[in-house]
Image (cartoon, rainbow, N blue to C red):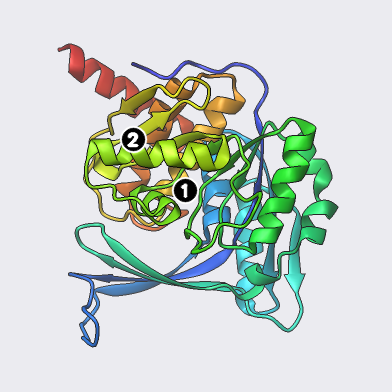
Amino acid sequence: MTAVEHTGPSPRIAVVGSINMDLVVRCQRLPRPGETIMGLDAREVSGGKGANQAVAAARLGAHVSMVGRVGSDGFGETLRNCLQAEGIHTAHVARTADCSSGLAIVAVETSGENAITVVPGANGRLSPEDVRAAADVIEAADVLLLQLEVPTETVIAASGIARSAGTRVILDPAPAPTDVPDGLLAVDLLCPNESEAAALTGLPVASDDDLRAAADRLHAMSGAGVIITLGERGALYRAGETGEFVQMPAYRCTAVDTTAAGDAFAAGLALRLAEGADVAESVRFANATAAIAASRHGAQPGMPTRAEVEQLMADSSQSTTE
């Protein structure tokens, strides 16, 4: 099935979340504890789950506003400039005095698997006051995207502003918290991956039945619709209203860097929902967006355009009918 062409105004997406500089090291395989290995190369790449989602949504054609913080170091100016270069509204991206920018150390093996260590830096200073100061862009948005690389009280504050204004809220609960504070999961859609679903619910996710049970538990905890992303197996959607399960297959790709595939998925999902597509069509589009991102190196550099996503969907549809 191909994506439905959208001819209306650009959807408005607000993103409240992290902005990092990623120090990316490629290696043949990830090191074991206590082991030293030789890397293949290293790069500085703009990242952070929030900024990744913002860039992905902008490349897909959305009007994007970013709410976040960078540090007073050299990375801070670079990170802000990178967002502006993508056409992202940065009036609510604040410089934080006497604080480093967020930093992520990303090891990526040649299979595409990765291991990431995040130092929050200025992201840890993003406050409920910051999001209240940005209430105008949150309330005007069609969709608010949230993640958990900033303080949970800030995420809860942003979600409350959005839901009071009728703005749809999508939460990518990564990294998954060890304790879930009241109100954190009070959103419209939850989009964890398998490991995050397991961490949030305390349930195994080894089988399809396990995944459905975890999705049921997440809905009981939140009242939200639940989409569990499954990597090369696609995504499992549990409708919040009916409890119906729909599994959407992934699009074929050769994964080289899965670092921001989940961020690309969230952006693609938000874009199509903001345009009025149903959840099933939105998940298909999100799966295609994530597949392309995983097939390229670098978090933000690998984010696709809308034309590329629609071409993949069209090519896949044609190949299944031949």
Residue 104 position in % (x across, y down): 47, 71
Q: Is mark 2 on a helix, strand or loop?
A: helix
Q: In this view, does 68 lie to the left or right of 55?
A: right
Q: Which residue is drawn at 24% across and 82% down?
A: 33
- The amino acid beneath tag 1 is Asp
Q: In this view, does 239 lie to the left or right of 9?
A: left
Mark 2 touches mark 1? (CB < 8 Å): no
Q: List the residue tagged with mark 1.
A: 263
Label 2 to label 1: alpha-carbon separation: 23 Å
Which labelled disc corresponds to residue 107?
none
Q: Which residue is drawn at 49% across and 64% down?
A: 178
Q: Is residue 79 left or right of residue 103?
A: right
- The amino acid beneath tag 2 is Arg
Quick one: 36 or 131, which is closer to the camera?
Answer: 131
Work out which quarter of the rendered image holds the N terminus and state it.
top left
Q: Quadrant of residue 57?
A: top right
As drawn, the residue found furthest toward the top would be: 321
Q: Which residue is drawn at 35% across and 33% down?
A: 236
Residue 256 position in % (x across, y down): 26, 54
Work out which quarter of the rendered image holds the C terminus and state it.
top left
Q: List the residue tagged with mark 2.
A: 212
Q: Residue at x 38, y 57 (%)?
A: 259
Label 2 vs label 1, nearer the camera: 2
Residue 7 position in % (x across, y down): 59, 16
Q: Is residue 278 above or below residue 154?
A: above
